[in-house]
């Protein structure tokens, strides 16, 4: 009976100690008595849940970096609506997020803005005088003279603003969340046969909403591209002068993007005669149709080690028949 009791006690003790011995055990030698060590065969690392993947995507988006990529646009805003020809834009993109060049550009812009504000008068008054000189032949010369007077108050404050302006350059270089994008395009890029036009595109973006689940950027953007078709003598020029607005959703090593270039120059482009013009390039006369729309972009950017892959769908007609694409693969530092 006593032996049965000890056997039952041993079995129950073994059952309770089994979970403990699965994760910890005494050292087999060399260590002090009573010290336990983790079993190397057990993986107690935390699982990579949704929060971990979201933080990874946020770090790839927010972290300072520079990316240099060849870029190819095809279709969409480069299409010729009359002939149906699908043109391409091929070039290179320089993207600087929180880097020294974007910071210096921001600082220089702030410095010149300070100079402009400091030099603006508080008020301007104008007066005009008119004199008439009669000639012997019966003609007369009328002369109108306008005098303008500018009033500047708070001269000490203005001088302080001027003196502090150069320091904004260094302060801008310390900012780490602005984004500078510069793209330029050439025909037959590097002899590859890709590219039907010329032009550039540049954006300077600043964070508006910065959170763990959502990132919103806005700023200023300028672009001018021209695609040409030598066979038909037609071309399309696209101009954007306005405010780009981009929303990013980070996840893993990627982030999804949806954005629009609000093209304020389109508000002053209602003259039909300006929408079509002719120009001569390399002894070929082209009929150029101008476009000033609001391009819409939806895409995905993936960062793996030193490489950045970006695929986007672009349209400025907001229809399935006008969809184009952007593809770029480059280095990220």
Image (cartoon, rainbow, N blue to C red):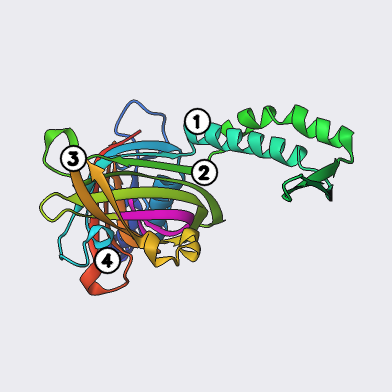
Q: Is residue 86 left or right of residue 293?
A: left
State the residue position of label 1.
Answer: 100
Q: Residues within 10 Å of mark 4 (few under 14, many from 20)?
A: few
Q: Earlier in the sequence, mark 3 or mark 1?
A: 1
Disc 4 or disc 2, which is closer to the eye? 2
The label shown at residue 283 is 3
Q: Position of residue 291 (x, y in %)?
A: 35, 61
Give the residue furthest to the front.
137
Mark 2, secondary structure of its residue: loop
Q: Which one is earlier in the sequence, the residue at label 4 or at label 2?
A: 4
Location of residue 105 with respect to 327 vertically, above or below: above
Q: CA distance from mark 3 to mark 2?
A: 43 Å
Q: Position of residue 68 (x, y in %)?
A: 31, 36
Instruction: Tell me the CA gap for discs 4 and 1.
Output: 79 Å
Taking depth in this image into account, of 158 and 249 the one nearest to the observer is: 158
| Residue at the image position 43 percent from the left and 51 percent from the top | 58
- Which residue occupies the foreground of this view, 206 or 243? 243
| First-in-chain label (4 vs 3) | 4
| Local SS, label 4 | helix
**Pointer 2 residue:** 178
Residue bounds of the magenta highlight: 237-257
Task: Give the label on residue 4, or none.
Answer: 4
Residue 310 can be seen in this image: yes
């Amino acid at each position: 009976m006593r032996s049965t009791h000890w056997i039952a006690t041993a079995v129950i003790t073994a059952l309770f100690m089994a979970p403990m011995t699965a994760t910890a055990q005494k050292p087999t030698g060399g260590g002090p008595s009573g010290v336990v060590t983790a079993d190397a065969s057990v993986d107690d690392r935390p699982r990579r849940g949704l929060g971990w993947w979201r933080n990874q995507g946020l770090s790839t988006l927010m972290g300072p970096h520079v990316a240099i990529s060849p870029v190819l646009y095809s279709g969409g805003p480069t299409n010729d609506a009359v002939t149906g020809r699908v043109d391409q834009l091929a070039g290179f993109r320089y993207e600087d997020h929180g880097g020294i060049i974007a910071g210096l550009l921001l600082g220089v812009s702030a410095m010149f803005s300070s100079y402009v504000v400091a030099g603006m008068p508080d008020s301007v008054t104008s007066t005009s005088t008119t004199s008439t000189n009669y000639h012997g032949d019966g003609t007369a010369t009328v002369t109108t003279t306008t005098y303008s007077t500018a009033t500047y108050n708070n001269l000490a404050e203005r001088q302080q603003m001027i003196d502090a302006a150069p320091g904004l350059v260094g302060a801008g270089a310390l900012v780490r969340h602005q984004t500078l994008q510069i793209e330029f395009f050439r025909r037959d890029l590097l002899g590859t046969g890709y590219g039907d036009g010329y032009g550039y595109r540049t954006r300077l973006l600043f964070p508006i909403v910065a959170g763990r689940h959502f990132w919103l950027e806005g700023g200023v953007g300028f672009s001018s591209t021209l695609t040409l078709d030598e066979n038909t003598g037609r071309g399309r020029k696209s101009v954007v002068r306005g405010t780009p607005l981009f929303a990013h959703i980070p996840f893993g090593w990627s982030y999804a993007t949806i954005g629009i270039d609000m093209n304020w120059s389109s508000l002053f482009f209602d003259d039909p005669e300006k929408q079509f013009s002719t120009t001569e390039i390399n002894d070929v006369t082209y009929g150029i149709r101008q476009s000033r729309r609001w391009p819409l972009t939806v895409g995905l950017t993936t960062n793996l080690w030193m490489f950045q892959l970006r695929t986007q769908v672009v349209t400025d007609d907001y229809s399935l028949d006008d969809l184009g694409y952007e593809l770029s693969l480059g280095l990220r530092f």
